[in-house]
Image (cartoon, grey):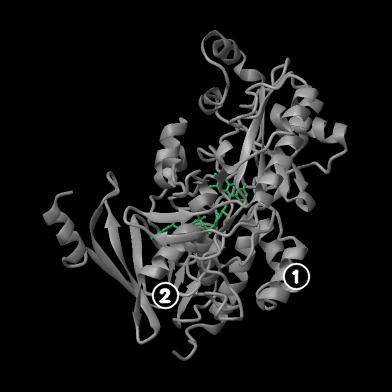
Amino acid sequence: MGLKQTLVSMFGKPVWEDRAHTLVVGTGAGGATAARVLAAQGVDVLMLEEGPKLVTADRPRDVPAALASTMREGGTQASGDLSPLVVLQGKCVGGSTAINSGIIWRMPEDVREDWIRNHGLASLVDATEFERIYDVIEEDLEVEETREDLLGGNGALMAKASKALGLPGKPMTRNAGRCEANGECLQGCPNENRQSMDVSYVPRAIADGARLRTLARVDRVWIENGRAVGVLGMALDPETREPVGRFQVRAENVVVAAGVVHTPIILRRSGLRGQVGERFQAHPGAAMLGRFDEPVRMAYGATQGYEVPMRSRGFKVESLSLPPEMLAARLPGVGAEWQERMKHLDHYAQWCAQVRMEAHGRIRPGLLGPSISFAPTDRDMAKMKDAFVTIGRMLFAAGAREVYPGIDGYPEVLRTEDELEHAARLPLGRNQVHLVASHLFGTAVAGADPSRSVVDPQLQSHQVSGLYVMDASVFPTNMGVNPQHAIMAVVYRAAEQLAASRGRRRAA
Ligand SMILES: Cc1cc2nc3c(=O)[nH]c(=O)nc-3n(C[C@H](O)[C@H](O)[C@H](O)COP(=O)(O)OP(=O)(O)OC[C@H]3O[C@@H](n4cnc5c(N)ncnc54)[C@H](O)[C@@H]3O)c2cc1C
């Protein structure tokens, strides 16, 4: 875009204006839930989403195009640290739920109790209310335990390993009651059997009267006299995704649900400070491959179907199937050695660990996009190593004849348990492993104490009345389990409270 066009788009007349009672920015787990609850209560809701609306039948099946069309920066968003952390997020209607595996976990009780005791959130996470809300969401989203015949070779081998080693493994519970084991969660479930927000709560909110505007990037909250009165943003071109002009919307309430990276950016651009962008937490992870004599057939079965939760040790092991083009890129070796491994592309299992890290990072607006920093502690890396060694032992227990750790400074190929135990004695530093995080928390945390939090227990900003945050940013801690269900429950509760207060604002 030329300079003149840029200036016109930034400072010219708005290309569109609108008005609503309640604006919801973002349509992921948090935003879609807020819109669904508010619309069902008769509130006039407008959803604004930076990404496009997805048409399931048209979603690309090849991985590069799938990543480019649905993920932020095509899946390459990363922290600016010397050893970058890849931070995966969806950028489309449905947010990260449109590309996730639909794994469902209720918030662990120790997390709920910690939030009550240390963050003053008793009303937000009330046990009786949570039970009711979980039941509603689980029915709405067809939540069921993965059947054995859907596990596929990748999940079934993990079940075998778990049994052999006496680990607490189990089939995953997912929001995909009608799963057909296509292994295409990332590209979008072909028959919409996985109930991501784009095929469940967003259409449901629209059926109840909510409106949706896509390719609408909110830049800041419009604040007058300490009250939120709307938002300002840029309309984006459907092809290039470049800004084509300003838009503005006025509203009684603004709910920001742009996810853990972009919610604090919007709030900071709007002038909010204090804890905004602080306490960024995650469950970073990495994966290991095992080669088996018999075909594993990773392409058949649930993308993720089996898990071994090890919360007391700070991590969780999950089966994670990859499309063949991504799997091929992970095979070690060069030349004839690599070609020999490629010939057996059907013989690999991949299992990953999600680690509940104690590190707190930070997010700030940067010149070219969000500036993300996150540095795992030594204790975090010790947990990561424990997870790697556990996965290695599991792969051998399931009968792997080769294990590929994918860790710099470790052998590329481990052929025996002795080799694994030898590798387990090597140190594991942050720069040796390629960490990826898809479970993100914090940056606009909830709490009763305004000096330690951004929003109050009703998820309304401590600083600006009528401004709410309803996404994973409000989590004061991470959890050690997959977050979508807990995010939805927290938002469901807060949105019900907002609907009940209909328009009543705290004095500015
Ligand atoms: C690959 C992957 C797999 C995952 N698998 C699972 C799983 O199986 N189970 C599980 O529990 N969790 C899983 N997660 C995590 C889970 O999906 C997220 O924790 C959850 O969706 C976060 O909800 P959210 O509302 O905070 O943000 P998101 O769902 O990311 O939604 C944020 C939305 O805001 C929009 N937005 C951002 N900025 C703006 C702006 N300026 N203007 C307008 N709109 C904006 C984004 O485009 C996006 O649609 C996975 C995540 C990923 C990336």
Query: Left or right of 410: which side holds 76?
Result: left
- Label 2 secondary element: loop
Q: Which residue is mark 2?
A: 272
Residue at 39% over, 85% down: 226
Q: Amino acid at mark 2?
A: Leu
- Residue 378 percent coordinates (x, y): 65, 50
Give the quadrant of residue 425: top right
For the point 69% across and 71% down, the residue is 115
* Residue marked by disc 1: 113
Question: Which numbered disc, 2 or 1, marks the residue that appears first in the sequence?
Answer: 1
Q: In the image, is residue 185 above or below residue 395?
A: below
The amino acid at mark 1 is Glu
Mark 1, Cα crowd under 10 Å, few <14 / some 14-19 / many 20+, is some
**Residue 471 can be seen, yes or no:** no
Whether residue 378 is visible: yes
Q: Position of residue 341 (x, y in %)?
A: 60, 14
Return the residue nearer the eye: 203 or 304. 304
Q: Is residue 193 above or below residue 329?
A: below
Q: Position of residue 501 (x, y in %)?
A: 54, 84
Say how many tags the image has. 2
